[in-house]
Amino acid sequence: MELSVLVAKIIAVIYLSASIGGFLDRDYFRRIADGMYKNAALAYMMGFVAVIFGFLILHFHNFRASDWTVLITIIGCLSLVKGVFIIVSPKYFQRLYEPFLTDRVLKNIPYVLLLLGVLFGYFGFVHGRG
């Protein structure tokens, strides 16, 4: 459980930071989305970071419990698959993501990240103390 709390704290800080960035600069996610695949080296590195992050979570936190800790395992799985997919086929991955890059969806991303950040923050910083 100690590891679950640590990973939840890390995820919370990442999501909350990205959310605040999105709220402070509305064009933030549009610029990120537009620039992600224009630079092949950046897309490749993004894939490697996702693979490393996902692999580390799955290696050290491969829990299939029926409580909140399974959310961390799911994030690890999604991160690993996403990273491999980006490395193997960045153009196809970009085409899959394009429907999610509309102005309407990008406006809502900070809210989604805020909710996820608060959720993981609760499990990491509040619930984890008990």
Image: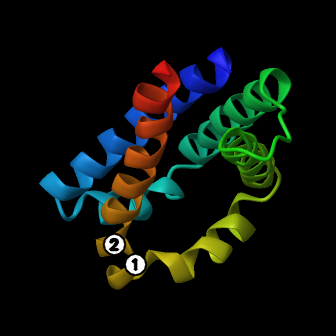
- Determine the residue positioned at 79% across, 20% down: 60
Question: In the figure, 87 relative to 61: above or below?
Answer: below
Q: What amino acid type is highlighted by mark number 1? A: Val
Q: Quadrant of the N terminus?
A: top right
Residue 98 position within the rendered picture, expressed as x and y whole percent measured from the top left: 55, 77
Residue 22 position within the rendered picture, expressed as x and y whole percent measured from the top left: 25, 56
Nearer-the-camera pick, 61 or 94: 61
Residue at the spot of label 1: 105
Count of numbered badges drawn on the protein: 2
Nearer-the-camera pick, 63 or 101: 63
Q: CA distance from mark 1 to mark 2?
A: 5 Å
- Determine the residue positioned at 78% across, 27% down: 61
Nearer-the-camera pick, 12 or 23: 12
Label 1 close to label 2 by CB (< 8 Å): yes
Residue at the spot of label 2: 108
Secondary structure of the residue carrying numbered label 1: helix
